[in-house]
Amino acid sequence: MARRGRLPLIFTCSLIVLGAVAVAAGARERDPAVRTPIPARTVSSHLYVDPTGAAVAAVRALDQAGRTAEATIVRRIAVQPVATWFTDGSPGYIARARRLVTAASAAGRTPVLTLYNIPHRDCSGHSAGGAASAAVYRVWVNNLAAALRGHRAIVVLEPDAVAQAVQGCLTAERAAERYALLRHAVAALRKAPGVVVYLDAGNPTWIAAARIAPALRAAGVGSATGFALNVANFEGTADNIAYGKAVSALLTGKHFVIDTSRNGNGPALRGAGDRHWCNPPGRRLGRVPTLHTGQPLVDAYLWVKRPGESDGACGPGQPAAGHWYPAYALGLAR
C-alpha cells in the first residue's frame, strides 16, 4: 500500500503466557515472557504462518532455481506470520477468508487479517480503489465477519482510513460516510467472540494524538479492541510506543498493536521530493511478530505490511503496490 510519509481485551478472564518466541534472521527474540491483555480464547500459542504467502512462493522458486543463498535470505521473511490482506470483493474472497481461519484453527494458531477496501481508499494514491459504494462495503464486511465466526482472528481494520479523513483529502460528506462505515465494520467483526479488531491510527509523524483520538472515537474505536500503528511505515518501535501511549491516554486506556515489519532501521531520511514512504532503500526487518511485548498497553508487534511486497510503482522498475518486489525483499532481509 502507499503511504504519504509525514502524512504517511480486554476481559477479566484468566490470561495466558504464550509459547515459544518466534525466530527471525537467525536470532531468538529476547522479550520477557509476560502475560498479554488479549483474552485466552482469542489467541493461541503462536500466530499463524500462511503457507500461500508471496515470500513462501519466492523461497520455493529460488530453491528450484538453485539460488540457495538468496532463498536462505528470503526465508527469514517466509517463516514469520504476516497479515493476510483482503482488498476487494473479487469472487472467492469469502471462501479465502474461511480457508484461512479454518487452517489456522486446525493448526492451533491465530491468523492476522488486514481489511483494506474502504470506498475512496488512499485518496487517489498508489493504492487507490476500494469498494464502489457504502452499500457494497457493508455487504463485504458482513460477509467477512460471517466467514470468521467460530474462529480466532486478529483484524487490522482499514489502514490510513481514519488518518486520511483527518488529513482532509475527503469531502466532509465522504468523511462522515467513512466514519459510519468504520463503525459498522467494527460492530460487525466484534460480533464474533474470537475476533479482535484494531482500528488503524496512522503513525507518530502523521496526525497529532490530540487530532487522531477524536477521529478514532468517531470511527468506533470505543467498540474495537484498540488501535493499530505504523502499518506499512518505518517509524521506530520506541516512537510508536510513545505515540500510542499519548493516543491511549485520550481514549480511556485503549490498547494498541504496532507494525514492525520494516522498521528495523528506522525511517528513511526525508528530503525535498523524497518519497521516503515508498520502497525507501536501506530499510530492514523489524522485531519479529509476538504477543510478548513487555509493554502493558502494547498487545502485539505484528508484521501487517507484508515485507517484500511493493508500496507502489514509484521508481524505475518498481512493481505496483502489493506485488512481490524481489530486490526489495532481499534488501530488507539481509
Image (spheres, helix red, strand yellow):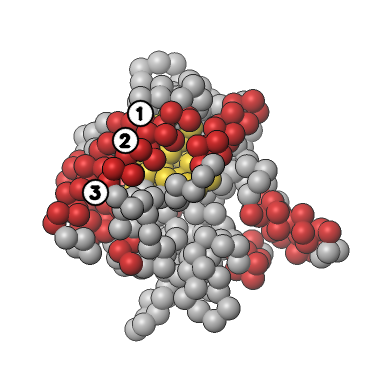
Residue type indicated by callout 3: Arg
The reply to whether residue 122 is in sight is yes
Pointer 2 with pointer 1, Cβ within 8 A: yes
Q: Which residue is mark 3?
A: 178
**Which callout, 2 or 3, points at the residue further toward the start of the chain?**
3
Label 2 to label 1: alpha-carbon separation:
6 Å
| Residue occupying the point 36% across, 82% down | 273
Residue 35 image point, x, y percent: 47, 27
Q: Circle 1 sits in a helix, a strand or a loop, which is it?
A: helix
Cα distance between the residues tagged 1 and 3:
18 Å
Which element type, helix, strand or loop, lies under badge 3? helix
Which disc, if any, is residue 186?
A: 2
Residue sticking out furthest to the left = 172
Residue at coordinates 52% horizontally, 60% vertically from top-left? 322
Residue 57 % position (x, y): 70, 54
User: Where, quadrant-wise, is the C terminus in this rendering?
Assistant: bottom right
Quarter of the view holding residue 328: bottom right
Residue that label 1 marks: 190
Q: Residue at x 34, y 84 (%)?
A: 272
In the rendered image, the residue lying farthest to the right is 66
